Amino acid sequence: MLQLLFPLIRAIEPFLVPFCFVLAWGFAIALVWGLISMARDATTTAKRMHEVPCTTCRFFTDNYHLKCSVQPTIAETEEAIGCRDYSPQKYFFSIDR
C-alpha cells in the first residue's frame, strides 16, 4: 500500500512547500488582522462607555442593588447617555474648625 502512495507523494512534493508557506502567512495575517480589529472595537466601546454620565448624577446611589433611584433599568448603560432625568451633583464642602 505504501509503495502505491510513494509516487503520489513524490508528485505533489514540489507544490507542498509553497502551499504550506502561503497557508502559514495567511494564518499569521488573519491573526494580526483579528487582533487589530479587536483592539479598535474595544477602544470604540470604551470611548462610548465613558460618555455615560451616571456617576456624576445626583440620583446615582453607587449601590449594587439600586444604582439609580429614578432610572434603575438604564443606569450605567449606553441608554443612559441621553438620560432626560440627569441632574449633576453639587458638591458642598464645609470645613469644620
Image: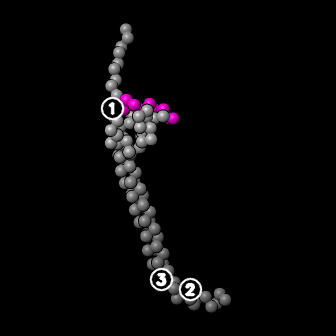
Asked which secondary structure carries label 2, the reply is: helix
Instruction: Residue at the far right: name it.
Output: 1
Q: Position of residue 67 (x, y in %)?
A: 45, 35
Q: Which mark is residue 9?
A: 2
Asked which secondary structure carries label 3, the reply is: helix
**Which stretch is magenta?**
56-65
Along the viewing direction, whichever of 30 and 18 lies nearer the viewer? 30
Q: Position of residue 41 (x, y in %)?
A: 38, 54
Q: CA distance from mark 2 to mark 3?
A: 10 Å
Vertical order, 50 against 40 (above or below): above
The residue that appears at 37% across and 8% down in the rendered structure is 97
Q: Quadrant of residue 69?
A: top left
Q: Mark 1, residues whose alpha carbon is within 10 Å: few (<14), some, or many (≥20)?
A: some
Q: CA distance from mark 2 to mark 1?
A: 75 Å
The residue that appears at 36% across and 32% down in the rendered structure is 57
Q: Which mark is residue 36?
A: none
Instruction: For the N terminus, give its image quadrant.
Output: bottom right
Q: Mark 3, residues whose alpha carbon is within 10 Å: few (<14), some, or many (≥20)?
A: few
Whether residue 50 is visible here, answered yes or no, is no
Q: Are marks 2 and 3 in contact (CB under 8 Å)?
A: no
Residue type, label 1 = Ser
Q: Earlier in the sequence, mark 2 or mark 3?
A: 2
| 38 lies left or right of 1 | left
Q: Position of residue 56 (x, y in %)?
A: 36, 32
Q: Earlier in the sequence, mark 3 or mark 1?
A: 3
Asked if the stretch drawn in magenta spans residue 29, the answer is: no
Residue type, label 3 = Phe
Q: Which residue is mark 3?
A: 15
Q: Which mark is residue 87?
A: 1
Residue type, label 2 = Ile
The residue that appears at 38% across and 45% down in the rendered structure is 79
